Image: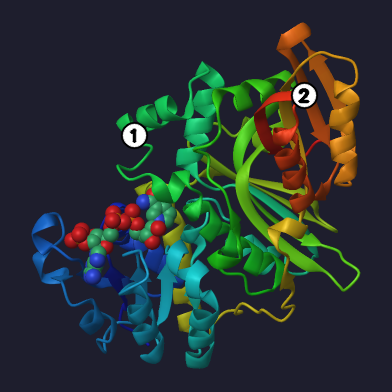
Amino acid sequence: MTGPLKVALLGCGTVGSAVLRVLQGQADELGARIGRPVEVAGVAVRRPAHHPDVPAHLLTTDAHALVTRDDVDLVVEVIGGIEPARSLMLAAFEAGKSVVSANKALLADDGVALHAAAAKAGVDLHYEAAVAGAIPILRPLRESLVGDQLSRIVGIVNGTTNYILSRMAETGAGFGEALAEATELGYAEADPTADVDGFDAAAKAAILASLAFHTPVSAADVHREGISTVTATDVARAAEIGCTVKLLAICERVPGEDGDSVAVRVHPAMIPTSHPLASVGGAFNAVFVEAEAAGQLMFYGQGAGGEPTASAVLGDLVAVARNRMTGAPGPGVTGYANLAVRPMAETPTRYHVSLDVADKPGVLAAVAQEFATHDVSISTVRQTGRGDAATLVIVTHSAPDAALSATISALREMPAVRGVTSVLRVEGLS
Ligand SMILES: NC(=O)c1ccc[n+]([C@@H]2O[C@H](COP(=O)([O-])OP(=O)(O)OC[C@H]3O[C@@H](n4cnc5c(N)ncnc54)[C@H](OP(=O)(O)O)[C@@H]3O)[C@@H](O)[C@H]2O)c1
């Protein structure tokens, strides 16, 4: 092998154009690091006329023909979505080409089949950019931490929702107002559903859990709640107990009598301001990892944007190109542990509940009894106000999520409870 390694770039949008700039601008550096020159073989797009900066001879609308071209060695998929990305990846594997992708939706949907296809073909499939943009987290899970036993990963993996929640905390604004500001500043897309409703974070949680626990986890296995129901009151109540509200992707190994299982969930939660994730503000991402031997680790940085994401794509590109040079793929991904995925109803969580009640004898006892009836023990109770304007703020100990939500439903029906004004899960409190 002497000629340049040729790369097919599928997609030239936010990420693809940044990848192309570096591939062309720093080709000598990259070639030196790989040990062989690297060159762009072609760029597949939907609308060639929209890409005046790309040399015309590189542009094509026939991505499949580009992927299967004999002179193409490696494929970078930054089209996004399920199809045609999946078919293109499979075509690349069949043709013996390694793939680098940033496609969280596809990997979370069909990671098992794609890894199997890559392994069968004896090629690499890398996708560091699919989770938390520039932050190296998948390679640490796949390689650096593979000798350790991971117990828990808690991530802020969606910059849009983190920006919105940060602004709600800073300004006291409601969700709608903060979303409007995020949209105006370009932090939220015109259709923010994938971010705001937690779909994007759920896909990333599935990928993180699969790698951390050597267990196939798909996006459908992830319990998902978004942030559109988080109110200014929730954020204010969090501040009162020294907490802040974040959308968390939580992947954990839960010990059980029948063996361990994994619980994977995405939902807003209060975390203490002293927790390392609490200081992750604006559109930044961070992933907090707990491992038996390593202890606690924190990965922090830019979770999106063309250049930061391109950094992760190019890191993968150099890695797979080096493997191509040595003639053997790197270590694959195993699902050997195949742990059961625990339903959310059985997953232990803690709740913070704020109730408007009448300040009358017996009310506190009746409320406490409702928790006891559902086998939920209370960690702290605080009462503010008097007479008709009394508020009870309760933080529970850990209990199965279903028991906690049943308690809330029962509280809503109690005559002494005028209203349940805030309910949020709590993470990281001692
Ligand atoms: N943007 C980020 O910050 C970020 C961060 C991490 C991961 N990612 C992931 O990176 C991937 C790309 O995201 P992006 O933001 O760069 O998307 P984007 O700006 O929408 O770009 C998509 C590109 O794919 C091309 N394309 C679409 N359908 C095609 C088809 N059938 N054949 C050939 N080309 C096609 C589009 O061509 P035209 O330009 O001609 O329409 C466009 O160039 C996604 O998987 C995303 O989840 C993005």
Give coordinates of residue 125: x percent, y percent.
49, 76
Which part of the image, by quadrant, shows the N terminus?
Answer: bottom left
- Classify the position of ligand 1 by quadrant: top left, top right, bottom left or bottom right: bottom left
Residue 123: x, y in percent?
48, 85
Instruction: Please report the residue visible at 64 percent of the width from the left and 54 percent of the height from the top.
Output: 265
- Label 2 secondary element: loop
Colour mapping used in the image = rainbow
| Numbered tag placed on residue 183 in the rendering | 1
Foreground pick, 38 / 61: 61
Say if residue 396 shows up in the picture: yes
Residue located 39% across and 63% down the image = 30
Amino acid, disc 1: Thr
Query: Which residue position holds label 2?
Result: 416
**Percent coordinates x, y for residue 12 in the rendering:** 25, 60
Earlier along the polypeptide chain: callout 1 or callout 2?
Answer: 1
Residue plotted at (74% across, 27% down): 415
Q: 273 or 404: which is nearer to us?
A: 404
Mark 1 residue CB less than 8 A from any atom of ligand 1: no
* Rendering quarter of residue 264: bottom right
- The circle on residue 378 is none
Mark 1 is surrounded, within 10 Å at the Cα level, by few (under 14), some (14 to 19) or many (20 or more) other residues, namely some
Along the line of sight, the residue nearer the viewer: 183 or 149: 183
Q: Which amino acid does label 2 sit on?
A: Ala
Secondary structure state at the residue bearing disc 1: helix
Q: Is residue 201 left or right of residue 176?
A: right
- Quadrant (top left/top right/bottom left/bottom right) for the C terminus: top right
